[in-house]
Image (cartoon, helix red, strand yellow):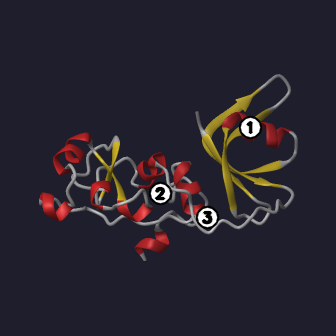
Amino acid sequence: MRQTLVLNASYEPLSTVSLRRAVVLVIQHKAIVEQAHPGLRVRAAAVELPVPQVIRLRRFVKVPFRQRAPWSRRGVLVRDRHRCAYCGRRATTIDHVVPKSQGGGDTWLNTVAACAEDNHRKAARTPAQAGMRLLAQPFEPTPADALLLAVGATDGDQLPDWLPLPGAAASA
């Protein structure tokens, strides 16, 4: 199911919602479609609108400040775009750079996406001990980056210019 990015009235990313929820918010005049999927439309008996990719709330919603994006296995896979950190193939698991048996934890900086073969080959060793090299260093996404990654924002063609791309600050 498609995910839609929800922006506050001030254009800051708030969350992602299902396509159905996004359409309901637009129909109830609680949100405005800021970016739509090209060529796709939602049709009902009395309404037709573009399939929203990004919506903006009409009223400002005060939310508690979140300094860090919560860590999750799915989040690591999304952050690394389902690509193995060791070989670049499709990743289906996560790997601890410093294994849990050696004191490593479930953190953004200690976990990477990995294919099952490389995860098994590395086992309970560090990449140096296993003679393996990381193709990219893990980073901790900001909460806004995590939301943009969740909706698949990986290139400039998908989202408007005024939304920063995920990892842009980390790679700069």
Q: Mark 2 points at which residue?
A: 155
Left or right, 59 with reference to 115: right
Q: How crowded is mark 1: few (under 14 residues within 10 Å), some or many (20 or more)?
A: few
Residue 82 percent across, percent down from the top left: 37, 47
Q: In front: 99, or 170? A: 99
Query: Earlier along the polypeptide chain: callout 3 or callout 1?
Result: 1
Asked if disc 2 and disc 3 are in contact, CB closer than 8 Å, the reply is no
**SS for dot 3:** loop
Residue 72 percent across, percent down from the top left: 49, 50
For discs 3 and 1, the disc positioned in front in the rendered view: 1
Q: Mark 1 points at which residue?
A: 21
Quadrant assignment for the N terminus: top right
**Which disc is residue 166 wearing?**
none
> What whole-number distance in Å separates the C-alpha atoms at marks 1 and 2?
25 Å
Residue at image coords 74%, 28%? 43
**SS for dot 1:** helix
Taking 42 as reference, is 87 above or below it? below
Q: Which amino acid does label 1 sit on?
A: Arg
Q: Name the residue under label 3.
A: 163
